[in-house]
Image (tube, rainbow, N blue to C red):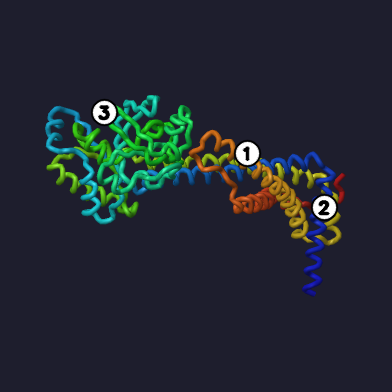
Amino acid sequence: MKKLSMRRNINFIAACLVSALHEMRTHKLRSFLSILGVMIGIASFLLMLSLSDMSMKTSQAFLDEIGGANQIEISNKQTASTKEALLQSRSRGLRTNELDSLCNNIEGLNCPFISRGEYGNNCQIGNETYECGYVGINPFLLAKYKMVAGRPISLAEYKQGRAVCLLPILFWKKIAKNRKCSAEEFIGTCIYGTGNHIFEVVGIFSQEFMPSDWSEYKNGIFIPNQYFEKRIGLPHQRGWDWVGVRAGSFQNIALIKERITQELISMHRGVVDFKFNKEDWIAKSQENTKKMNLTFMIITLLSLFVGGLNIMNVMMASISTRIREIGMRQAIGATPFQIFLQFMLEASFLSCVGGILGCALGIILTQLTGDAISKSFPMLIKVGLDPKNVVIGITVSALEGILFGLYPAIRAVRMNPVTALHYE
């Protein structure tokens, strides 16, 4: 009996699918427009998922490059009056040795990174002169960058303040236009800069996710911060423009900031000549990413909704032309559930066909969009379609057919068989 019942169910489902195919052949244009609506909706759904994934991965990669979401930035406080300037003169400003002390004295604080630039300089490489800027750094700032040629600055060179440098890839590309040599052959070349500074190029690095319009990545000469501190910037200036440290846990940032404040006030002879950056740009970046993803999702939902309305419209039209058929099926013993299931299967079938075609279109659009974005914005992670998203797309199309086929199926079930049989 169980086998017979199962066979009947299989035969019934097969008959429903045959009926759906017959309706598609009979009303080709109507079915095509319905499938097209779902196809566009699912394709846009997959594309938006890929763009959302791209924005999140790029944002996270950017945060990882600059120190992560646990980064704490401390900058010099600008004086508003002569009295404040006299008071701040008691302090030497933010110094490298203070960072080491902070990391040693405060639990959960590590990886200090500092950067200071002096721009508007010129440097000579061979017979060519370039506008450049000196950027003082420590090992942690460039730790995650990819070396295109040469090697990173060694810890010994940082500690000793050696006259060595790294060049960003954008600056090297500018130099390469005037020199007939590869990046590897350029390593070891001396750069003669303003202020009688001579630097040996030891490496060229690529900033994958940093904005390429930042001046330090266009024409910066990256040198050990000890050299910058002793020979270029700090002898006649009050410390670094800003310094950064990384907290071990995002939840402990408020507590760590309080400890940093106490330690720095003590080091600066009671002078509060520093501040934490008020603008939480990391949080803003994450918030903007969420807003963009929300916008993508709204657009996708609208596309799916339009596709669902097409399914409902086609099923309502199909029912209006099959009223006598519904009455005859009820008269010969078809149960309300069987009629309901028949139209639900037809709606789901139409939606799934559109979903499968939409997945194919989505894969093509994602690939084309990824290539276009990679050419225009090379710092962004290339858009790629996760196979899981394809499965999600087909599932969503099936659910769309069930949801928007529900009302037409219920309407078919509620038809009076006598009225339906006499319908002309």
Q: Which residue is mark 3?
A: 195
Q: Look at the numbered disc 1 and give the secondary structure of its residue.
A: helix
**Mark 1 residue crowding within 10 angstroms, few (<14) / some (14–19) / many (20+):** few
Instruction: Place residue 274 in its image quadrant.
Output: top left
Q: Position of residue 116 (x, y in %)?
A: 29, 36
- What residue appears at the point 32 percent right and 26 percent down from the top-left corner? 121
Residue under the point 81% across and 41% down: 28
The quadrant of the picture occupied by the C terminus is top right
Can you tell which of label 2 and label 1 is closer to the viewer? Answer: 1
Tell me the element at label 3.
loop
User: Where does label 1 land, which residue?
Assistant: 368
Q: Nearer the viewer, residue 261 or 291?
A: 261
Looking at the figure, which quarter contains the N terminus?
bottom right
Give the x, y percent position of residue 231.
23, 35
Query: Alpha-carbon distance for marks 2 and 3?
Result: 86 Å
Residue under label 2, please give it: 19
Residue type at numbered disc 1: Leu
User: Of circles 1 and 3, which is in front?
Assistant: 3
Check the image and report above or below for 193 versus 147.
above
Instruction: Select label 2 or label 3 by which is in front.
Output: 3
The residue nearer to you, when weighing 191 against 144, is 191
**Residue 205 spot, x, y in % from top left:** 42, 41
In the rendered structure, the answer to whether residue 135 lies left or right of residue 218 reads left
Q: Looking at the picture, does residue 14 appear above or below residue 373?
A: below
How much space separates mark 1 and mark 3, taking CA atoms?
Answer: 50 Å
269 or 297: nearer the viewer: 269
